[in-house]
Image (spheres, coloured by chain):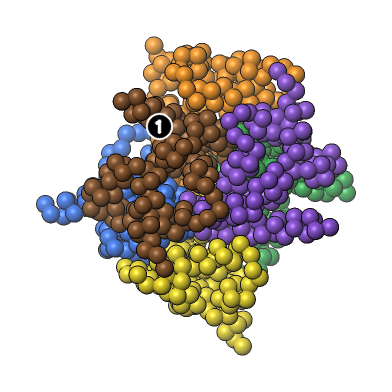
Chain colours: A yellow, B blue, C orange, D green, E purple, F brown
Amino acid sequence: MPDFGFVGESKARELFGDKRYEATRTNAPAGRRRDLIRLADSVVFGQVYPRPGLTPEQRSLSTVAALTVLGQLPQLRAHVTGALNVGVSEDEIAEVITQMAMYAGFPAALNAMQVADECFDAVATERKK
Amino acid sequence: MPDFGFVGESKARELFGDKRYEATRTNAPAGRRRDLIRLADSVVFGQVYPRPGLTPEQRSLSTVAALTVLGQLPQLRAHVTGALNVGVSEDEIAEVITQMAMYAGFPAALNAMQVADECFDAVATERKK
Amino acid sequence: MPDFGFVGESKARELFGDKRYEATRTNAPAGRRRDLIRLADSVVFGQVYPRPGLTPEQRSLSTVAALTVLGQLPQLRAHVTGALNVGVSEDEIAEVITQMAMYAGFPAALNAMQVADECFDAVATERKK
Amino acid sequence: MPDFGFVGESKARELFGDKRYEATRTNAPAGRRRDLIRLADSVVFGQVYPRPGLTPEQRSLSTVAALTVLGQLPQLRAHVTGALNVGVSEDEIAEVITQMAMYAGFPAALNAMQVADECFDAVATERKK
Amino acid sequence: MPDFGFVGESKARELFGDKRYEATRTNAPAGRRRDLIRLADSVVFGQVYPRPGLTPEQRSLSTVAALTVLGQLPQLRAHVTGALNVGVSEDEIAEVITQMAMYAGFPAALNAMQVADECFDAVATERKK
Amino acid sequence: MPDFGFVGESKARELFGDKRYEATRTNAPAGRRRDLIRLADSVVFGQVYPRPGLTPEQRSLSTVAALTVLGQLPQLRAHVTGALNVGVSEDEIAEVITQMAMYAGFPAALNAMQVADECFDAVATERKK
């Protein structure tokens, strides 16, 4: 059995970038939430994301769909930025969110799109530097 | 402005196949639900699915993600079969559903996977004929 | 303080009709669910529905909206029939369900409309007798 | 086929008022969310709200019910104010939200009522001017 | 029939403490929300919490589970603090939230845990005084 | 790192009983759902349930709360029976479900209680043999 914590860290760094990984994990204040992130990384990024069958782009887009439907906006923010990191385009992200209006209603899509717009701006600004 | 009803019918036939399209639309018993399907086809398949930015495979996988999270199993059944029709593989569908366990919990994923297994069997049987 | 159980019984009989009231309450098999229905009747129909500010028609339509969004189909069935009993029209019920597609997605509306169609048929058949 | 964008704009102006319409549409910063609002207006206000069968008051109250259940508070804020614009009373709005406690739980109703109180105050202040 | 308002006030004071009770009830600004809190106290704390069959600790932990799943964070904040008041340990609260990741997904659990961490810190600071 | 699959199997057998474990795992027909159950067992019962901080009774009751709120009835059926197996009483289960009416609405609680009643009857019948 591989070390899921180790695999998860590497996958999470790849997706979110080292800077964000360290801000939310290594350098985050001690507490129950930090412990839970460690468990989440080990399960989500250590045991599920490394499975074959989907490309990283497909995993990111499916996650954007899920978080839009669920209205989990802090996680959506992280994953929209992650999606751009692994090569998903702004158009793809915006279209998936638009399509979610059909299945989960317009309010869910509108609130998610606001988060996406903010991520698009932040990444564009970052890349210009 | 294009005729959304016309575009929607053509997209819906492409996704679900003529046989299922006719069973659930043209030949369905009159009633409010049939009227609502007509509106849904015009909006979902006439105005959203034809937008550029995503391939049909990407639209299908995002829809599978959404319906798994929402637990809308009758629609999931239609869209898993539709996904296979447009060339999405069983592996891709099963992996998206598995990944949803991370974002919406294991029960949502398990109940969706039961529907997927049934669709996989039905399509395999159909193709053998 | 009024006797909420007594008020609730009278309101619930008014909405659902004596026959359904008795089938699901007085004559229902003993069990935890029957106890919970008694609590629900006392709270919902004894303490909330009798409040001023909304007509019975408005309460019924709002409940149809809520149950459509929540996907609680057994309760939707009871309340669509109840809405017809207090004078809400089929058109009003069907339009509220249609509108829910905008806020909670098309699958929620489509599954609710199937229940509504079945209630409309059952009540029409009953009235013809 | 009517021009849904045109019909939708007129309906949305009627419901939200010109000032709010322009702040969130015409004068909103360009971005994906503004594009999605245009689609939403065309579908929701251009194709669904103009359907016969419900009065504007009934549509507004059903929407308040839906947004309370869904916990979509930014949209609830817009629609509570819209409901007051089309002649729904504070009592009716508050009673629908109260009733939602029965179907979606007290937390959903309490969080919605806080938004409603804020809208009631803002509109009362506005009207005094 | 007991006076549910009276019983509810006593239960709510026990759970939340007099200071918080008064801040959110007696001394809260008049408005629809305050009226709804009165109804909620009468039903939730006056008619349900006093029922036999569960200890106060069990009721608190079940409520923490429910509010985590629902993502109702303002109520979660009140009930995590309440749980500590009635003798539930930080470990128990954190474990229930962790377990919810399995049934409702990691985002729901992570967002709830952030609230819990804040409550744990606030109560620890308060107790040190 | 322990073998999570092994720990998970032992925990799941303890909770659900060998007979149900084998019917749904070892002897279940091959398919994607069986693979997903294996992952779920490894994560849920192998990595989360064995954590210290909660008794098995507390884990079961929290799960009953979660599944009631989510309306995931097939899983609720398994976990109500599991709760009885680890020593939770019918009263405790019924009270947790009743309390969920306050947080997630009466329909969620009523539909869950029907499942609970069926489990109570099935276990009572089984024990009489």
Q: Position of residue E129 (x, y in %)?
A: 84, 57
Residue at the image position 57 percent from the left and 45 percent from the top: E66
Residue at the image position 39 percent from the left and 11 percent from the top: C129
| Residue C56 position (above or below residue F38) | above
* Viewer-nearest residue: B120 or B14: B120
Residue at the image position 54 percent from the left and 50 percent from the top: F54
Q: Position of residue D125 (x, y in %)?
A: 85, 47
Horizontal relation, residue A123 to residue E23: left or right:
left
| Residue C49 position (above or below residue A9) | above
Q: Position of residue A27 (x, y in %)?
A: 62, 76
Work out whether residue F30 can be spotted.
yes
Taking the view exactly as shown, the residue that stands out farthest to the bottom is A129
Total marks placed: 1
Helix, strand or loop status at disc 1: helix
Residue at the image position 64 percent from the left and 54 percent from the top: E90
| Residue C58 position (above or below residue F41) | above
* Viewer-nearest residue: F122 or B95: F122
The chain ID associated with circle 1 is F
| Residue C1 position (above or below residue D69) | above
Assess disc 1: are there few (<14), some (14-19) or many (≥20) residues with their C-alpha within 10 Å of its C-alpha.
many
Taking the view exactly as shown, the residue that stands out farthest to the left is B129
Residue type (three-letter) at the residue carrying disc 1: Cys
Work out whether residue D65 can be spotted.
no
**Residue occupied by mark 1:** F119
Taking the view exactly as shown, the residue that stands out farthest to the right is D129
* Viewer-nearest residue: A79 or D47: A79
Q: Position of residue B104 (x, y in %)?
A: 47, 54
